[in-house]
Image: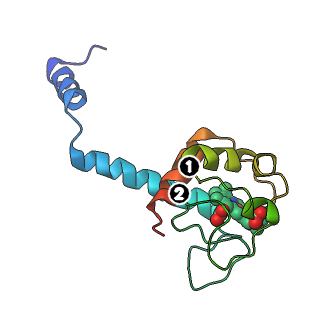
C-alpha cells in the first residue's frame, strides 16, 4: 500500500529535521550511560569509581590523558609503572582488546573486549570521569 500524501509529507518532515544541539548532547549522554553499563559489567569488580574505596585495580577517574602507571599510591606492576606512555583513546582500545599483549607483565588479568562499539561506549564513560 502506498502511504497517503499526508503520511509521506510527515515522514519527509521528520527525516529532514535538522538535529538540534540539544539532541546531540543527548546522544553524548546516552553513550556515557551505555558505557557505565558496560563498565559495571566488565570492569567495576576490580575498578571502583569511588575515590574513598580501595579496589584491586587503580582508580580510573581522569585516566584519559594520564601517564600510565602513575595514579598516586597505587601499587602498579613494574611493567605498567615503567611503561611511560600516556593513555590516549588508541592506547585504551588496545588495552581493552588485549591488555597483556599491549603491556606484557601487567598484573591486570586478561580482558578481551574487542567490540569497537563497546569500546566507544566505555571510552565515552571514562572520558566523563574527571580526575
Ligand atoms: C580482574 C580485575 C580487573 C578487571 C576485570 C579490569 N581491570 Fe583494569 N586493572 C586491574 C589491575 C590489577 C590493574 C593494574 C595493572 C598493573 O599494575 O599492571 C589495572 C589497570 C588498568 C588501567 C591502567 C590505569 C593506570 O593508571 O595506568 C586501565 C586503563 C584499566 N585497568 C582499564 C580497565 C577497563 C576499561 C576494564 C574493563 C574493560 C578493566 N580495566 C577491567 C584489574 C582489572
Instruction: Give coordinates of residue 33: x percent, y percent.
Output: 46, 58
**In whole angstroms, how far apart are the C-alphas of marks 2 and 1?**
6 Å
Q: Which mark is residue 64?
A: 2
The label number, if any, that marks residue 11 in the structure image: none
- For mark 2, does the 10 Å Cα neighbourhood hold few (<14), some (14 to 19), or many (20 or more) residues? many
Which residue is rendered at x = 20% and y = 23% of the image?
12
Mark 1 C-beta closer than 8 Å to ligand 1: no
Residue, far right:
105
Foreground residue, 27 or 86? 86
In the depicted structure, whether residue 131 falls above or below residue 19: below
Q: Are marks 2 and 1 in contact (CB under 8 Å)?
A: yes
- The answer to whether residue 94 is above or below residue 3 is below
- Dot 2 or dot 1, earlier in sequence: 2
The residue tagged 1 is 88
Residue positioned 57% across, 86% down in the render: 52
Horizontal and vertical percent for residue 55? 69, 78
Amino acid at each position: 500500500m502506498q502511504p497517503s500524501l499526508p503520511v509521506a509529507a510527515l515522514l519527509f518532515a521528520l527525516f529532514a529535521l535538522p538535529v538540534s544541539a540539544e539532541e546531540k548532547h543527548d546522544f553524548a549522554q546516552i553513550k556515557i550511560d551505555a558505557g557505565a553499563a558496560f563498565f559495571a559489567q566488565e570492569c567495576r569488580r576490580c575498578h571502583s569509581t569511588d575515590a574513598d574505596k580501595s579496589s584491586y585495580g587503580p582508580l580510573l577517574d581522569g585516566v584519559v590523558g594520564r601517564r600510565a602507571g602513575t595514579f598516586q599510591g597505587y601499587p602498579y606492576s613494574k611493567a605498567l609503572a615503567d611503561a611511560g606512555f600516556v593513555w590516549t583513546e588508541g592506547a585504551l582500545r588496545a588495552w581493552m582488546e588485549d591488555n597483556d599483549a599491549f603491556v606484557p607483565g601487567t598484573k591486570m588479568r586478561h580482558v578481551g573486549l574487542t567490540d569497537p562499539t563497546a569500546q566507544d561506549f566505555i571510552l565515552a564513560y571514562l572520558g566523563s570521569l574527571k580526575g
